[in-house]
Structures are given as C-alpha cells and as structure tokens.
Image (cartoon, rainbow, N blue to C red):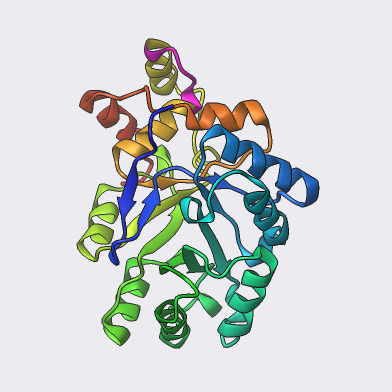
C-alpha cells in the first residue's frame, strides 16, 4: 500500500489524511477494529471521551507492533465538560495509557457558543505537551474567529460533517485562510452512494463509490475518518492510494453539492 499522505497543521505536526472513526464502537469490537486497522496500514485513530472506548483504543495501540509515535490519536473534550478541561484530558490519557494525544478537540461548541475560555485552557494543555495539537469540532467560521480574536491562535483543525452533498469551496477557503485544517466526519451518511456520477466514476476506475468519495476528500486535502468495524470495509476504505481522480472528475463530484 502507498504511504498515506499528510496535511501539515499550523504548528508543524502532520495529520494523516485518512483515519478510522470509532463512534459507537465499544469493548471487544472497538479493540478488534483498531487492531485490524493498524495492521491494514491506518496510522490515525479518532475517538472522543463520549465514545467511551478510549481504554480499548489505547490497549489496541499498545498491543500492536506499531510505535506509539507513528500513530496519530485524536480524542475530544465533551461540550458539557467545559470548565473541567484538565481533569478531562488527564482521564483520557489514563484511559488511553498514553502520555499525550496528537490532537485534542472541543467536541461541540459548549452551550452553542465559541467559549474562548475553554479554548484558552486547551492551548495551555497543548503548551504543556499533553496534546501535540488542539482544535475544535462543529464550529462555524464566526466561532473560529472569536477564538482567534481572543487568543491570537487558531485551532489546528475543525472537524465538521463533510461529503460531496455538503461541498462548499468558499467554506474550505475560509478555513485555509485562517490556517485551519478541515477534517470531515460521516463521509457516507450525507452521500447518495448510488448517484450516477459516483457509480460511473467508480466503474471507470474499478473501485466502489465509497472509495471514490474517500479519494475525493484526499484530492481536496480534507482529512476523512470513515467508521467501520467490518474488516473488509476497513481494508477497502484505505485502499484508495492507487486511485487518482482527474480534475474533471473532482469537479463533477463537487457538483453534487446541495449547498447554494
């Protein structure tokens, strides 16, 4: 398998452009999925305190033959834990059995607001080395600007729901102007994998429509974290680096956007 490409974060850290999402994976299922994913070549695992699987993920990474430094691990601060940032990250690190996470995100805007005070706490924890990078999830551009205005430091990542039907070139550009990497969750839930454009492109390349969607993310340098517990699907999702889409194919997929 070809080497997974990276996006470079504002602090110089590198995040693999594809990872394994682990929402709703628990217990032995989570452990087995992570072990298989690491064996299949994944080097990026996304979790969250609210997923309640940090212990299994940490054990799977530790039990693998992969050096911890070569696995990019993300977890997230629950919105309701704003004000309890330090005990939350300390519990996450204990559960993971790790000295640091590679990325720590505010899972949702606490109370629906940007909450610069929470962001300041994340920055402090990053400065101590407990997280290599910090960012947010599900924030608007206005909320990003509120954090930047308050601290002079932009989130490294904004993890948002993303897929062809949600494509917005202007939104991507606004993130890039601020030095914020976009990471997309639920790449398939908002996508009609039976759409004729995706089916046609997939047939041309001898791949599945799902693989086309994942490759489309890579072409846009948007990090993507498909979730699966099925070994065949896990392997299929990362088997996209022998595939490349032409500029015309990318543009046709962009055209599936339902945003005006």
Image quadrant where residue 189 sits: top right
Start-end of magenta stretch:
205-210
Q: Is residue 229 positioned above or below 56 on the image?
A: above
Q: Is residue 244 left or right of residue 66?
A: left
> Which residue corresponds to the image point at 51% horizontal and 22% vertical from the top-left?
194
Q: Position of residue 256 (x, y in %)?
A: 36, 33
Farthest right residue in view? 28
Image quadrant where residue 117 sits: bottom left
Q: Is residue 216 left or right of residue 48?
A: left
Asked if residue 96 shows in the view, the reply is yes
Q: Nearer the viewer, residue 179 or 86?
A: 86
Q: Position of residue 137 (x, y in %)?
A: 47, 64
Q: Is residue 54 positioned above or below 90 on the image?
A: above
Q: Is residue 134 positioned above or below 12 on the image?
A: below
> Which residue corresponds to the image point at 55% horizontal and 50% vertical from the top-left?
45
Queried whether the magenta region covers residue 141, the answer comes back as no
> From the image, which quarter does the N terminus lie in?
top left
């Amino acid at each position: 398998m070809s080497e997974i490409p990276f996006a470079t974060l504002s602090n110089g850290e590198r995040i693999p452009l594809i990872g394994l999402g682990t929402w709703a994976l628990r217990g032995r299922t989570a452990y087995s999925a992570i072990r298989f994913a690491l064996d299949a070549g994944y080097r990026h695992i996304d979790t969250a305190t609210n997923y309640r699987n940090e212990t299994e993920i940490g054990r799977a990474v530790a039990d693998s033959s992969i050096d911890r430094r070569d696995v990019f691990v993300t977890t997230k601060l629950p919105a309701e834990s704003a004000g309890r940032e330090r005990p939350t990250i300390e519990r996450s690190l204990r559960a993971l059995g790790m000295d640091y996470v590679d990325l720590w995100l505010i899972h949702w805007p606490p109370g629906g607001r940007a909450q610069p005070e929470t962001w300041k706490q994340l920055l402090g924890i990053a400065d101590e080395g407990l997280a290599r990078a910090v960012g947010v999830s599900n924030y608007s551009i206005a909320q990003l600007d509120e954090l930047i205005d308050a601290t002079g430091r932009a989130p490294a990542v904004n993890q948002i729901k993303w897929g062809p039907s949600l494509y917005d070139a202007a939104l991507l550009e606004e993130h890039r102007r601020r030095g914020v990497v976009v990471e997309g969750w639920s790449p398939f839930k908002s996508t009609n994998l039976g759409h004729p454009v995706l089916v046609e492109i997939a047939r041309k390349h001898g791949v599945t429509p799902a693989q086309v969607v994942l490759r489309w993310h890579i072409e846009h340098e948007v990090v993507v974290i498909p979730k699966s517990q099925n070994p065949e699907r896990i392997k299929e999702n990362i088997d996209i680096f022998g595939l490349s889409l032409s500029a015309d194919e990318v543009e046709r997929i962009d055209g599936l956007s339902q945003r005006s």
